[in-house]
Image (cartoon, rainbow, N blue to C red):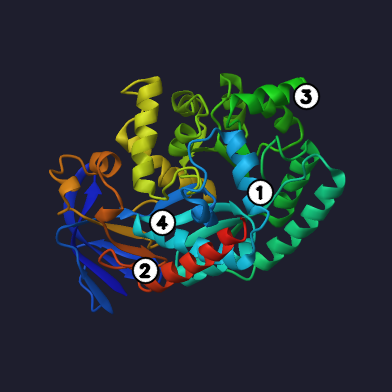
Amino acid sequence: MILIENAKVLRNDKLISTNILIEENKISAIGDVKSKSDYVIDGRGLAVIPGLFNSHTHAAMTLFRGYADDMPLQEWLEKKIWPAEAKLNEEVVYWASKLACIEMLKSGTTFFLDMYFFPQATARAVEETGIRACLSSAFFDFFSKDLLEVNLKRVEKELKELKNFRVLRAIAPHAVYTVSLEGLQRAMEIAERENIFVHFHLAETEKEVLEFKKKHGKGIVKALDEIGFLSPRLISAHCVWLEGSEIELMAKRGVNAVHCPASNMKLSVGKALNYPEMKKAGLNVLLGTDGAASNNSLDILREMKFSALLQKFYYGADLFKAVDAFRIATENASKAFGIKAGKLEVGWLADLVLINLSKVSMNPCHDLVANLVYSASSECVDTVVVDGKIVVENGYFEGKEKILERFSKTAEKFFAGLV
């Protein structure tokens, strides 16, 4: 049992002092609760918030942080990222993912959705660091039936291996410009059979949308609907270049869209996800950092700020508020993944973050949510609890130095092999 005493929590838009009791992996009581707990946290000067969700990333791309900056998306992928990724191995992905898990935990992320290669290596990193995750087996077919068969065979094997870990699972056909419609259809069939999620890049650039329409004579979303690809299982990253009718159709089918503002701005995709239209249509919107190669951070607190600023810049100051940014990083993601987290409620999972209110950036505190969105960063995170276990304490992740040392040596060896 863990007892958090005299911490601040939001109740009816007001900060109040209270106690929170954690038993096993759930919140068992909130209020004037006393208990002989195994561990007591002095919550004075701290605010407790639900753990944050990073709903689209490529964790092991910490390896490529700063490797290929200041380039447009397609050139970035084809000339730098894909050639380097062709030389990846399980050891590199393991250490790069472990570094990513620490970075996310230290910035208040308790759950992430990942799309990358060697997912079993990332699963090991997830279990060893204590974070919660949904891991995807990713594939491309580049419109080759032979390549599709080879990759789906690998995907089936990886999805089976992931059953051995404490993770949710997903299949991840990359995008419409790298995977055939047959590949997408078969991915959804596998997802339905295995009762897992589908992780996908959608409408990230205008070029992607125009080339698809030229090739197929119809828009991407319509084509995806015709093959039964639109589903509540579908977590679609970016969703920038969508028409109003496409947004309405996605909402009708229960699809989830992920806002990745920092990556979209850095790769200059030319537009912002249309949150006002999505909210009006009832489309569930989540928040993601994308990978550290295109962000270059996995700090979801900073991503909340980017989400708000980009929306305000593009659509108007009053159409996206701090509470919207906070909601897409918590409640909306909880709904998408079917996880009873993202709220501070009795009976919900004990995935919590304690924020240090004494940090300069948190003062004064007229509005906790506004401070979290507009001024907080990882330096404000004091303690992180995931599944009822403390994984970050006083801002420190135990073993960080050794992990960073091993990652650095592994990365140096990897890049020496690229020359």
Q: Which mark is residue 83?
A: 1
Per the image, the residue denoted by label 3 is 215
Q: CA distance from mark 4 to mark 2?
A: 11 Å
Label 3 crowd bin: few (<14), some (14–19), many (20+), radius 10 Å: few
Identify the residue at image location x=20%, y=71%. 34
Horizontal relation, residue 318 to residue 278: left or right: left
Horizontal relation, residue 60 to residue 299: left or right: right
Label 1 crowd bin: few (<14), some (14–19), many (20+), radius 10 Å: few
Label 4 crowd bin: few (<14), some (14–19), many (20+), radius 10 Å: many
Mark 4 or mark 1, which is nearer to you?
1
Q: Quadrant of residue 104?
A: bottom left
Mark 1 or mark 2, which is nearer to you?
1
Per the image, the residue denoted by label 2 is 391
Mark 1 or mark 3, which is nearer to you?
1
Q: CA distance from mark 3 to mark 4?
A: 39 Å
Mark 4 or mark 2, which is nearer to you?
4
Per the image, the residue denoted by label 4 is 104
Amino acid type at image mark 2: Val
Label 1 element class? helix
Q: CA distance from mark 1 to mark 2?
A: 35 Å
Amino acid type at image mark 3: Lys
Q: CA distance from mark 3 to mark 2?
A: 49 Å
Amino acid type at image mark 1: Pro
